Amino acid sequence: MNAAFCLAEKLKMDCVIFHDVDMFPADDRINYGCPDTPRHIGAYVNTLGYRLMYAEIVGGVLAIRMNHFHAVNGFSNEFWGWGGEDDDMGIRILTLNMTIERPDAFIGRYVMLEHIKRKDSNNRLMRKLQIIEKFISSRRMLKASHIRMQWDGVTNISWRIIKVIKRPLYYHMYVDVGRPPHGWH
């Protein structure tokens, strides 16, 4: 995500929107603009009962101005795979006393596509244990988000652009971000 931000900055954009590919607005009146504070556009999701679960949540769809992204040092580079990075970003935003704006709870509803569950396999128990281990590691890391944001983020990224495809409304980037830290599965 930090690599995408760097491309947007190079293109002289004033705002970036990070959008999960499995989420769709239920109402076409949703505002995809960038206000003066970070906007958690995807706050109310069907899989969460259209409820805001906690204050620092910014997952799903986040609009943020370039100066705010720099102020929080972007997304952490320490989270790999699924989970934790959005909560870390929310903590970074709140640490700097920024307000997280959210849309109206009725207009700002999103539908998340159903995720296909894997069929039963011999490695099912091992996979569950790995998920639990990753969850515990993520929670531990979130406790230090306000400290890590000083050095972990857009200022210390290491990546290589493989290919960029320009589309009418977006850029599709293929990025090599290297290998995950030891212990991430």
Image (cartoon, rainbow, N blue to C red):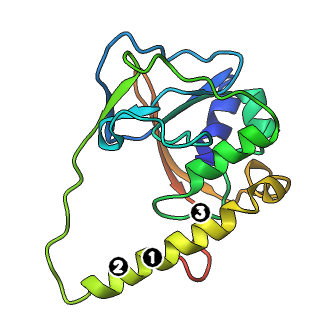
Expressed as whole percent of the image width and height from the top left, the position of residue 113 reads 24, 42
Q: Which residue is mark 3?
A: 79
Expressed as whole percent of the image width and height from the top left, the position of residue 184 reads 53, 76
Vertical relation: 48 (above or below) 151: above
Q: Is residue 180 visible?
A: no
- Rounded to the nearest whole Å, what is the CA distance between mark 1 and mark 3? 15 Å
User: Counting residues from the N terminus, which is met first, the one under dot 1 or under dot 3?
Assistant: 3
Residue 165: mark in rendering: none
Name the residue located 48 percent from the left edge and 42 percent from the top edge. 53
Q: Nearer the viewer, mark 1 or mark 3?
A: 1
The one of 100 and 3 positioned closer to us in this rendering:
100
Name the residue located 34 percent from the left edge and 30 percent from the top edge. 110
Name the residue located 74 percent from the left edge and 53 percent from the top edge. 153
- Rounded to the nearest whole Å, what is the CA distance between mark 3 and mark 2? 18 Å
Helix, strand or loop for disc 2:
helix
User: Counting residues from the N terminus, which is met first, the one under dot 3 or under dot 2?
Assistant: 3
Vertical relation: 102 (above or below) 20: above
Helix, strand or loop for disc 1:
helix
Q: Which residue is mark 1?
A: 132
Report the amino acid beneath label 1: Ile
- Asked if labels 1 and 2 touch by Cβ distance under 8 angstroms, the answer is yes
Q: Which residue is mark 2?
A: 128
Residue extending farthest left: 119
Report the amino acid beneath label 2: Lys
Vertical relation: 142 (above or below) 41: below
Picture mark count: 3
Expressed as whole percent of the image width and height from the top left, the position of residue 52 reads 48, 36
Residue extending farthest top: 29
Q: Seen in the image, is 6 located left or right of residue 67?
A: left
Report the amino acid beneath label 3: Phe
